[in-house]
Image (tube, helix red, strand yellow):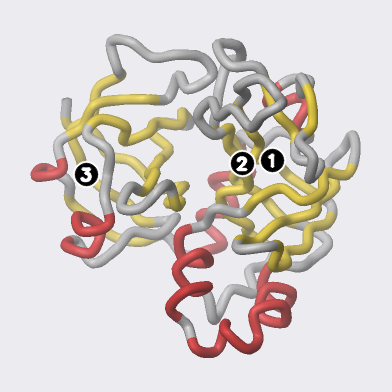
Amino acid sequence: MKIDAIITDVTRMRAPKVCIAALRGGNSIRLNSPAPKDHWLRSIGGLTPGDAVSLTWRAARRCHRPHLEDGDWNPALFTKVHRLPDDELIKLLSANAFRSIKDTFGKPCFYSESGNAAFTPSKGARSLASVIVSSVRAYPYGEGVRADFVDDRREWTRVPIEDLVIRDHQTNCSSCSSSLPALLASEFGGTQAVLRVGLARPFEAKPNAAACYLQVNHVFLIPSKRDHFV
């Protein structure tokens, strides 16, 4: 079925796969099968949140909670139409945003050694959402980037950020090789923001049981200060 949608999430998975999700009429959808890959993304000139697109998509016949947004799509029939300004995208995301991670995904079943929240597989009503937060900061952590943020209920710490642009900058940007902490702080640190958050596919990190770990897909400061990571 041909549909129009607004891209909301473009995140790094294990290379060469990327995860792409969008809003269609206020509901999140994911381009799950076939899995989008780096070479296809490059062939269309890349994608970022705010891109308006036309594509064929239908809900997957079988999907597993909490990843109910999964669907089938055809890369050959995918077209970029135009792009929303940042303020319009933030307004769109804010309209259906939650006020806390607990309201979004429920109560974590445990926390990893680094402190990140883990959620029970095969449960939950969603794996993608927008959350309004009162403060956020981003910083390098090991080989990745993490976020601390405060929602209406509590503070969350050391949550992985999987924004594809940020992750690519880590490995390919000369400025980031020397100034990554300062660049992250200047563009993703603030007192009001909308986060795109998600639950990863079930992963077993022994000695813990398999779980869907919390991640931050994108940080949208209000107002936006994004300049370098584009």
Amino acid type indicated by mark 1: Val
Q: Is residue 56 left or right of residue 163?
A: left
Nearest the camera: 194 or 85? 194
Whether tag 1 and tag 2 are in contact, CB under 8 A, the answer is: yes
Q: Position of residue 119 (x, y in %)?
A: 68, 23
Mark 2 lies on residue: 197
Q: Position of residue 32 (x, y in %)?
A: 31, 32
Whether tag 1 and tag 3 are in contact, CB under 8 A, the answer is: no
- Mark 3, secondary structure of its residue: strand
Compared to 177, does 88 lie above or below?
Answer: above
Mark 3 lies on residue: 54
Location of residue 214 (image quadrant): top right
Could you tell me which residue is drawn at 32 percent across and 52 percent down? Answer: 52
Mark 1 lies on residue: 131
Q: Position of residue 137 (x, y in %)?
A: 78, 63
Counting residues from the start of the chain, the first of labels 3 and 2 encountered is 3
